[in-house]
Amino acid sequence: INDFVDKIREIAAGLGYQEIMSAVLTNKSYLYKKMNIEDFGTIEIEDYMSETYSAVRSWIIPSLMEVFSKNKHVDFPQMIFEEGIVNVRKGEKIEEFERIGVAVSHEKANYTEVRQVLDCIMRLLGLHYDIEETEHNSFIEGRAGRAIVKGRKIAYLGEIHPQVLENWNLEMPVAALELNLTELFEIVENKK
């Protein structure tokens, strides 16, 4: 999977996105409250040293939003991505996934921009995908989708909701995509 992940990272960089690296530890406020969604399976640290790092990340887009919030003084457009591990609790089970989050921020950032990133990745992997409209409170209603490959839901993409932008003190629009590389890798391997 490491070679596969590196290939996807190279594609994102080749499209002009700058790679960032953030901590795997974060907090529930960043993961859910600021992103305008409910907790969907957090792994919390029992004896944390700082509330800022009191949970393991369950998705990557909040990390990208944090970077944008700390870089409002930098020129736009800002185009960033991060690849890394996320962990999600499902009942007593903990699932670990490799994911990539891609986000762009500028005056006219929109759904089409992140959809083009997904198009490029899928085309280079030789995969067909479909998009179904979805509801996700981090995204604007009607401007969010779920990518499906061979019946498996592998990505969320869309325009970040104005309330989420406000929660992060952002003035510029943001469009983002989060792709499950673990599942995508399994699909590619089964295709061989």
Image (cartoon, grey):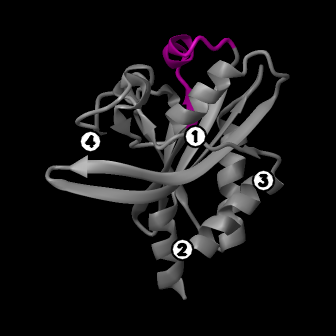
Disc 2, SS = loop
Query: Is 164 situated above or below 147?
Result: above
Report crowding for label 1: few under 14, some 14 to 19, many 20 or more residues within 10 A (C-alpha): some
Residue at the image point whose x is 52% and y is 21% from the top: 161
Residue at the image point whose x is 67% and y is 62% from the top: 8
The residue beneath circle 1 is 22
Q: Residue flagged by tag 3: what amino acid is it? A: Ala
Foreground mark, 1 or 4, reads 1
> Who is closer to the viewer here, 35 or 89?
89
> Who is closer to the viewer here, 67 or 153?
67
Q: Residue flagged by tag 1: what amino acid is it? A: Ser
Determine the CA span between mark 4 and mark 2.
24 Å
Foreground mark, 3 or 1, reads 1
User: What stretch of residues is rendered in magenta?
Assistant: 158-171
Q: Residue flagged by tag 2: what amino acid is it? A: Ile
Determine the CA span between mark 2 and mark 3.
18 Å
Report crowding for label 2: few under 14, some 14 to 19, many 20 or more residues within 10 A (C-alpha): few
Determine the CA span between mark 1 and mark 4.
20 Å
The quarter of the picture where residue 72 lies is top right
